[in-house]
Image: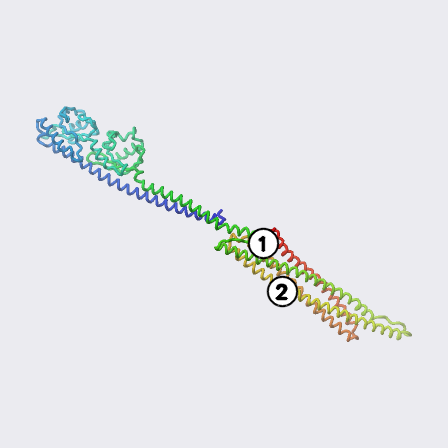
Amino acid sequence: MFKSIKSKILALLLLAVMVLIATNLIAVVAARRDQAEQLRIALQDSALANSKMVDERIRRHIDRLSVLANTATVKGDDKNAAQAYLLAELNRDLNQEGYYFDLISLADLDGTAFAVDGSRVDASDRAYFQAVLNGQDIVVSEPIISRSGGKISVAIGMAVKRDGRLFRVLIGLMSLERLSDEVAAMRHGENGRAYIIDANGTCIAHPDKELLGVDFSKTGGPVTQQMADMIKTMIIDKAGVAEYGFMGVNSILNYQPIPSTGWILAVVADRNEVFAAVDNLTRQLTAIIVITTLLLLILGWYFTSKTVQPISDLITATSRVAQGDLDTEIVVDTGDEIGYLARSFDQMRQDTKELVNNIAVAGNRVSDIAKALAVKADQTAAAVQNAGIPVSGAGKAGTGPGGGEAGAVSFRTEHDRQGIDNVVNTMREIERSANQVTASLNTLNQAIDDVGQFVEAINAIAGQTNKLALDAAVEATRAGEAGKGFTVVADEVRNLAESSAESAAEISRLISRIVSEVKQQSAAVVVSEDGKKKMPRNERMMQHVNQSLAAIIGLVQDLSEKAKDVAVAAEQVGRAGQDVDDAGNNSRS
C-alpha cells in the first residue's frame, strides 16, 4: 500500500483534506458551544427579568386590592355605593399598561357577588372564596372561567375586615388573556415564546390562548410525554434549563419562579432559529470542504499523473535496457529534475552501448591474437622437437665402441674421425636449430608484447567500464524507485568489467611466466652456441642442451595451452558484446 508516488501524493492530499475537515469541525463545534452558552445566558437573563416584572405587577394588583379593602366605602354598610366605587376604580385603571383586572367585585359572606353589568353571581363554591372564609387573608385561585364575563381568569380573593372580623370578600378577576398578551412579548427571537404555569402545571399565560387552562403536566393534545415530564421537573426545581419538543419545534427554555403567586415563567427559544447562523455556517463549510476536496483530488490526480508518467516511461525504458536493449531511447521532455535524470540515464545508455561495442571489438582482436600466439607456440614446439633428434644422435656418436688391436688404431681413428664429423655435423645442426629457436623465440617475444598491449587496452576499457557502472549506480540510487531497472544494467556492466579485468590479469600472469621461461631458454641457446667452441665438453654440453630443449618443449606446450585459454576468454568477451548487439538489433526490429 502506498508504494507508488501517485498514491503517496494522493494520500498526502487526503490527509490535508482530513486536517481541513477536522479544523472546520472543531470550529463548528466551538461556534455551537459558544452559541449555546450565549443562548443559556440570554434565556436566563430574560426569564429572571420577566419573572421579576410579572411578580412586581401581580404584587401591585394585590396591593391595589389591599388598599381598596381598607377604604371606608368598601367597609361601609351601603353595598351599592361600595360596588359603584369599585367599578369606578376599575374603569380608571383599566387602560393602564400592565393592568390585569377586568372585574373587581364585592361578595357577601354567603357568596353573593355583583357582576360587571350589576347582576348577581354566586361565588360561594369557589375554592378561593372558601379559603378566605377559612381564615386566609389573600388567596390566588387556579385558572377559572369567570361567571360574569365567561373568560378564563385568575381570581384574587382578599378578606375585608371590620372591627377585626371578616365582613366581606373583595374579589379581583385577572384576565389571563391580558396577561398572555404581555407574556407573548417576552419571547426570545422571532419563533420563540414565553408562558406561565401555576404550581400544578396548569397554563396561566401563553401566546396560544387556546392552551390557557391546559394542564401541561398531563399528556394529551399538544402535550407530549417529554413535555409532561419536563413540566413536572419544572414544578419541583422551580428554576433551571430544559430542552423538549413542542408541536414539531425543538425548544430550549429557561424557567424562573414568580414568588408572589408560586407560578413559574418559562422563556423559550427555537433551537433551529437560534442555531440557524451556525447551521448555515456548517452547511457552507461542508459545501466548501466538498468542493475543495473534489478540486484537490482532481488537481492532485492530474498533476501527479503528469509528474509520474515521465517516471513510468523512464522505468519502462530502463527495464528494457536492463534486458539488454541498449537501442531504446529514453525520451522525457520535462524540464525538471525528472527530465534531467532521464537525460542522464540516456547518456549513460549511449556510453554503455559504445563501451560494450568497444569491448566486443577488443575481445575479437584479443581472440585473434591469442589464436596466432597459439600457432606460434605450436611452431616453436615443433622446432624444438626437431632439434632434439640430432642432439640425441650426437650423444650416441660420441660414445661408439672400438675394434680389435690389429685394426683398432685404424678403426678407432676412422671411428673417431667419423665421430668428430658427426659431432661437427651435429653441432652445425644444433647451430641451425638454435638459430631457428632463437628466431622463434624472438617472434614469440614480439607476439607476447602485442598481447601485453591489448591486455593494457582491456584493463583500460575495464576500468572505464567500472567507472561508468559506478556512475550509473549513483544515478540510479538518486532516482529511487524509478532507477531500479537501470541499477540492474549498472550491475551487469560492472560484472562484465570485473570479468574482463580478471581475464586480463590472468593473461598478464601467463605472459610473465612465458617471458621468464623464454629468457631461460634463450640462455640455454647461448650455452648451446658456446658448446661449438668448447668441443672437449661436447657430450656434457649436448646433454645439457638436450635437457634445456626438453624444458623448452614443455614450456611452449604450456604456453600453447595458456594461449588457448586466452582465446576462449576473449571469445567469451566477444560473444557477450555480440549478444548485446543482437539484443539491440532485435529490439529495433
Pick the residue in front: 61 or 337. Answer: 337
Q: State how many labels appear.
A: 2
Helix, strand or loop at label 1? It is: loop
Left/right placement of residue 6 relative to residue 49 reads right
Q: Is residue 475 above or below residue 226?
A: below
> Circle 2 sits in a helix, a strand or a loop, which is it?
helix
Q: Quadrant of residue 176 in the image?
A: top left
Q: Quadrant of residue 223?
A: top left
Name the foreground residue: 227 vs 379: 379
Q: Looking at the image, is mark 2 or mark 1 nearer the viewer?
A: 1
Mark 2 and mark 1 lie on one chain; the one further toward the N terminus is 1
Residue 148 x/y as whole percent? 17, 26
Left or right of residue 54: residue 535: right
Position of residue 50 measured from the top left corner of the image (x, y, whole percent): 22, 38
Q: Indicate whether 99 appears above or below 310.
A: above
Q: Determine which residue is flagged by label 2.
A: 456
Tag 2: amino acid: Glu
Label 1 crowding class (10 Å Cα cut-off): few <14, some 14-19, many 20+?
many
Q: Position of residue 203 (x, y in %)?
A: 24, 31
For the residue pair 444 and 63, the one nearer the viewer reads as: 444
Residue, disc 1: 327
Label of residue 579 in the image: none
Callout 1, which amino acid?
Asp
Mark 2 Cα-neighbour bin, 10 Å: few <14, some 14–19, many ≥20: some
- View extreme (right): residue: 406
